[in-house]
Each structure stands twice: as structure tokens, then as C-alpha cells.
Image (tube, rainbow, N blue to C red):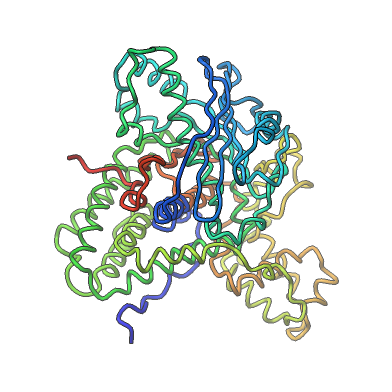
Amino acid sequence: MNANAPHIARRDPAQVMTLRRLGSLHQCRLSFMRILTRRMANEAWSFSRPLFEIDASGVGQAVYTATGPSRSYSLVAFAHDLPDELRSDRVIAEAWDATFALFDGIPTQDDIDRLSQNVPLQEAGRVSENELSLSRANRSVRLWTHVVDALAAGRQPDQRMIDNVGYLMRTTAVYGSGKFGAADREDIADRPEMHAPFQAEMLSVYLTRTFVRDLVQHMARAKGGDRSADLDPAIARRLGIGNSTGLGMAPFIVNHPVLFNNWIMAREEAISRVRSLRSATPEAKSTFLEKLARSEISVARWTSEHPVQIDKLADLHRDLGDLRTYVDQGHLDGPDPWDRLFTWAEGALCEEGQELVASLILEPYSEIVDGLANCMADSNTDAFRIDGSMRVAEVRDLIETSFGWALGTDWQSRRNCARAWYVSAEKLEPRLGERFDEPIADYEQPLAPARDAARAFEALSGWDDNVPIAGFLLKHPEHRHTIRRAQISRIAPYGEIRDNTIAEDVMPIDMLRAKLSFFGATHFDPRSDRWVRICMYAGAPYPEELVPENADDWVYPELPA
């Protein structure tokens, strides 16, 4: 038997796929930002800024080009002079401090002119199949003003303010995958650099961060002239790109069960592989302990004003203290150290702490973890085709496997169906409303898989076990989406949330965090139960600094000298 072959099974989906646990996930080696920076460094991508025409008031345009082994991608950026009264984090905003498109290749002047007429309009404009993403960002006004004023006066900005905010601009949307005329995902999915999920969007944000750094430096020089200072590279690296994410992202993981399964399964497989290791080398233990120490710094800088996150952070601080005591007592020595640590964490720590441990134990093992990034895309085009020949009995079994917990739920109770998902007419964005207080039931979207599974299971109760499911669907086409999901579960055991997504106490921010953790986001800061602020690429090397040695663990703050 191969000594490194996994003998610890992946965790049961019933344990992993609750909203409370999904809302406690942390970034890891398989996060999309880290996948991208590793690839760019290992393939020695080159970067250039062929255009930077910004005036003294901060208005103009710029182009940033990233070139890999086979092709180039260019961020086309437009800077605007936005009055304070028009600045908003909401998706319904109509003006922004900066707008962007990621161009497939190197744009000509005609391309830039075309984009200049459309990108600043965002949803009201249109892009083409030559663009891979469309995005916008607003300044963090207080920190932006402070950094410009400090540099213009010849001094560095206050590092405490840098750490408290974490970003100079925050995006309010990064649209890709065919929205507003942009290229479909299928158009680029076979490119090696785009095979992992959301790589175009992650590249757009990475280049946006560089543009923001250059823009604030430009504004400082315009104000201070010869007396202005250059932003210290060490301070610049601590700045990420903020993001405000709302309900528009939440239904994604419900609507993409195969894709979401692949993300979770890859992570669970990585955890299983590491837990199955019989021993830990001194180098592996050293790497784990270093990342733990750097995580302690990161958590110390993580703040929130939301009561739910405040409580979770308090638990996490306690968990880190207990984890530090555990490892300092030598428990990583001896056989099966990672499985023993993981089993201890499941009994001693809260979900936040458990999932941080799950991420940290992957850090020493790039050789058995990183290759799983190639398994995270959804290339199964046949998964959504219903197999009408499947017997009713088998469909019942599949529903029970994925939704057994929901079959005994009282779906007539108002508390269990208090909410309803619908799409706003104004912005065509998902919304969550109060079913019994608003006239929205007629517009409800199929985003309550558990309730719908219970309804389908009940409807199947009178059908003969051996009848093909096609006969049932001819009489009950309203259950097609549930039967499809049940059949998908054969290849996607982690594809279903094991919780009620329309309950009165549902926390949509748990769904947001689950997705954003795979992006590689840190310092989640819920602003309500429906939207959250995060930071992306804080600590990452800028393009001119990116090398294999710093391309991966930048997400953890540096230890004090």
C-alpha cells in the first residue's frame, strides 16, 4: 500500500454542507487568487503599462497588460471625478470612481475608444466578446484622502489606518461569463490559464489593485509636486482591493451544484490526503507553525461591527489560544499528527476554528494539494440532462440521501418558509423578501431546494417503484428541477446545501462567505445579514515583484522582524 494513499475518508456532506459551516470557511491553497498568482509566477508572466493618461484631477484612462506563455490580457481602466454624493456601495449606483474591462489581448486605440463609451456606463453600456469582465470601484474616501495628503506632504501614511481599512478602493461588482455582451465562459474555458474557476475575474482584480496604487501615487504627485514621497512598497503590499458583495452572489452556489461540489470536494480531498499522512517532517511542522503564527496576526487585525461576526471572532480568538496550547505541547510529534489535530479540533473548537485548522494543515503540502486546482472547474456538460429512464425508487433514494433532513420539516409553518427569493425588476438582481409581508410569492425563484425536494418526494409517494421517472414528470413537470438536482447528486455529493434557504432565520451572508472564501478573500465584515465587505490581494506582491518565492503565502501577514 502506498504510504501516502488516503485512508481517512472525506468528511460527510451532511457535516460539511450546513450553512453555519459554509459560513465559517477560510481561504486555502486552492483559493482562486492563490492559484492565479502561483501560475503567473511559475510561468514568468510579464506585465506592462502601455497607457497611463490621467490628469491632475484624477480623470483619464490607463491600460495594464499581463502576458503569459500563449496570450495577453489587458485591463482597460477609466478614472472618474466622482462627487461624494454619487458614491455608493450599492449595486444600483450609476456612477463610480473607476470602471474597468478586462480585454482579451492587447487593445487598439479603436478598442479603447469603444470601451470609453460603454465601460463607464456599466450595466447601461455594452461590451463585446473581446472583453472577459466588466467591473467598477469606489474609493475608501477617508483612507484615500489620508494617503494622498501624506504622500503629497512627503511622508508615509499611518500604518494603523492602512490596517484598519485595508484598501484604497473597493469593487461593487466584477461581472464576467457573458454578462452585458462579454465573452462566455465556454469561450475561454479550455485555456490552461483560465481552466480554474474565476481566473479572468481574479486577474482583473489583481491588475485593478496595481492601477489603484499607481493612481493614488499620481494624485499625490499632482498635489505635492517635488516634495511628494513615493509610497513605501511594504505599505503598498498591505493594501488590497475591497469588495462589497450582496445578495446577487448568494444564489450562485444553489444554481451551480456541480461547480460548487467540485470546489468543496477538491478541498475535502486535500484535507483527506493530509490527514492520511502517517507522520510530519520537521519542515512540514515548521511551515504549519509559521502559518499559524501569521494567522494569529491576521485574526488580530480582523474587525467587524456585525454582532454575529463579533461573536464568531471572539470564538476564533479563543480557538487560536487553544490551538497554540495544543501544538506547543508537542502534539504534532508522533504518528498521524494531522488526523489527531483535526479530530481534536472537531471536539475542542467552533466551526470557525475547525475550518481554519483545515486550511492551515494544507499549507506544508503543495505537492499533494495544488494539483487539485485542475479538478475545480465544471466541464460536465451532460450533468443537467435528466435521465428519464431512471426508476422512481432510485430517484426517491437520491432525494433521501441529499434531503433526508428536510423530509420531516413542517413546510406549512410560516417560520420555515418565511422568505422568498425573487429577481428585482430594476436591476435584474436576486433579492430575498418576506413571503407573508410582500407580494412576491408569484415571482419566487427556485432557490429553495429543500422545500421543493420535500414536495417532490411527497408527490412520488403514490408511484410504483419501477416506473420510469419520465412518466412522473409528464404529469408533474413542476418537479423537473428537483429531479434534475437529485440525479446530479450522484456525481456531486457536495452540491446541495443541507439547510433551509427560505427560513426566517436564514443568514445569506453564510452563502456569500462560502463563495468568497474560495476566491481567497479575508477579513469578512458583514454589514447586515445580506451583504459583506471583504479584502482581496492584501499582502500580495505587485506585478514587478511577483516571483515563485512570494507568489503563494502572501495571504498571511509577515511576522515581525
Which residue is pictured at 34% across the width and 24% down the height?
230
In the image, residue 122 above or below residue 12? above
Q: Is residue 340 visible?
A: yes
Q: 471 or 519, which lies in front?
A: 519
Could you tell me which quadrant the C terminus lies in?
Answer: top left
Question: Left or right of 443: which side holds 235?
Answer: left
Q: Position of residue 357 (x, y in %)?
A: 32, 58
Could you tell me which quadrant the N terminus lies in?
Answer: bottom left
Q: Position of residue 423 (x, y in %)?
A: 72, 43
Q: Position of residue 48 (x, y in %)?
A: 48, 38
Q: 67 or 83, which lies in front?
A: 67
Question: Left or right of 422: which side holds 530?
Answer: left
Q: 388 or 418, which lies in front?
A: 388
Q: Is residue 26 visible?
A: no
Which residue is pictured at 75% across the width and 46% down the height?
441
Question: Left or right of 400: which side holds 428?
Answer: right
Q: Position of residue 289 (x, y in %)?
A: 22, 55
Q: Find residue 465 and report its image quarter.
A: bottom right
In the image, residue 306 above or below residue 9? above
Outermost left residue: 329
In the image, residue 471 above or below residue 363? below
How many numbered marks are there? 0
Which residue is pictured at 73% across the width and 80% down the height?
392
In the image, residue 378 above or below residue 419? below
